[in-house]
Amino acid sequence: MVGAIASGQMAEHIGRKGSLMIAAIPNIIGWLAISFAKDTSFLYMGRLLEGFGVGVISYTVPVYIAEISPQNMRGALGSVNQLSVTIGIVLAYILGMFVPWRMLAVIGILPCTILIPGLFFIPESPRWLAKMNKMEDFETSLQVLRGFETDITSEVNDIKRAVTSANKRAAIRFQELNQKKFRMPLILGIGLLVLQQLSGINAILFYASSIFKAAGITNSDLATSGLGGIQVLATLVTTWLLDRAGRRILLIISSAGMTISLLAVAVIFFIKDTVSQDSHMYYILSMVSLLAIVAYVIAFSFGMGAIPWVIMSE
């Protein structure tokens, strides 16, 4: 939360690349603290540093993607952020089956270690450069992103107009956020992301193995890895659908699917407590609960997973 709150000002003052560079450092230190932990204090410190780094990254990456993307591909490219998160989750599931947790923490250092030198090879956000009045760097960055054979004149003018208009406005004070023109974007942006977290997805994913065991699934670790793989595929489909079907309809379908699936899981677990574990009904209920959890994850991936991040950056 602290990282997310600080990330806005950080990204405005030192740029999107600079923010990601800074965020990588506490992530690396955090994973080192976890991997070499001698007691719980090291784990707490590691998680605290990880939380700050992830908070900064969670804001900066969607904004950076939105600012470098062509307008007709903004939704699809914006959802790649969530796709990458799901790939990371399934990799952690699979690796967790074969390596101890300390080694898994060491492996967690690798992406951030690659990120730091990698940032030197990607252009800064053209919109941020234009906002900082670095016009030559702005046009160079945009040309690199669009390709040297592409005419960027029209897009350059559009960005200049947007930045000039934004710079003319006075800085918004906290008290002014209650004004009508700010109220709806604020409610949508914050509301969707709050509902995304309150939907229970992290509880399901973090405790998937325990949930599958409670449902009577024998190989719960394998089932958990399979669930992660399904989430990756569903998010991949969403990436393709986002700019074709639109944000709203996917959010409606996603929310309805999640509601029905979670209700089914709750009812099944309630009924299972009254059924003998040796009965055929118990086996049927276990399979249906597994299908309901899979349906829940697919429904989340179709909308509530990726779309709130895209809408927030738009």
Image (cartoon, grey):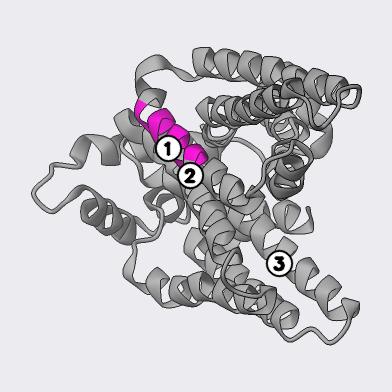
Residue nearest the viewer, comparing 263 with 122: 263
Q: Would you say residue 120 sits in the magenta stretch?
A: no
Secondary element under disc 1, as helix, strand or loop, is helix
Residue 283 position in % (x across, y down): 70, 28
Q: Which residue is mark 3?
A: 50
Q: In screen coordinates, is 302 left or right of 4?
A: left
In depth, the one of 114 and 59 nearer the eye is 114
Identify which amino acid the numbered label 2 is placed on. Answer: Gly
Magenta highlight range: 230-240
What distance separates the C-alpha of mark 3 from that of mark 1? 27 Å
Q: Element at badge 3?
A: helix
Quadrant of res 106 = bottom right
Can you tell which mark lies on residue 229? Answer: 2
Q: Earlier in the sequence, mark 3 or mark 1?
A: 3
Measured from the top left, where is residue 166 in percent x and y? 53, 37
Work out whether 31 lies above or below 66. Answer: below
Residue that protrudes farthest toward the left in the picture: 149
Q: Residue at x 82, y 74 (%)?
A: 43
Question: How far apart are labels 2 and 3 at the CA level?
Answer: 24 Å
The residue where tag 1 is placed is: 233
Asked whether the viewer can see residue 31, the reply is yes
Answer whether labels 1 and 2 touch (C-beta < 8 Å): yes
Q: Where residue 47 appears, x then y in whole percent?
A: 77, 67
User: Disc 2 or disc 3, which is closer to the eye?
Assistant: 2
Residue positioned 21% across, 47% down in the render: 146
Checking the image for residue 7, the label placed there is none
Q: Is residue 23 left or right of residue 158?
A: right
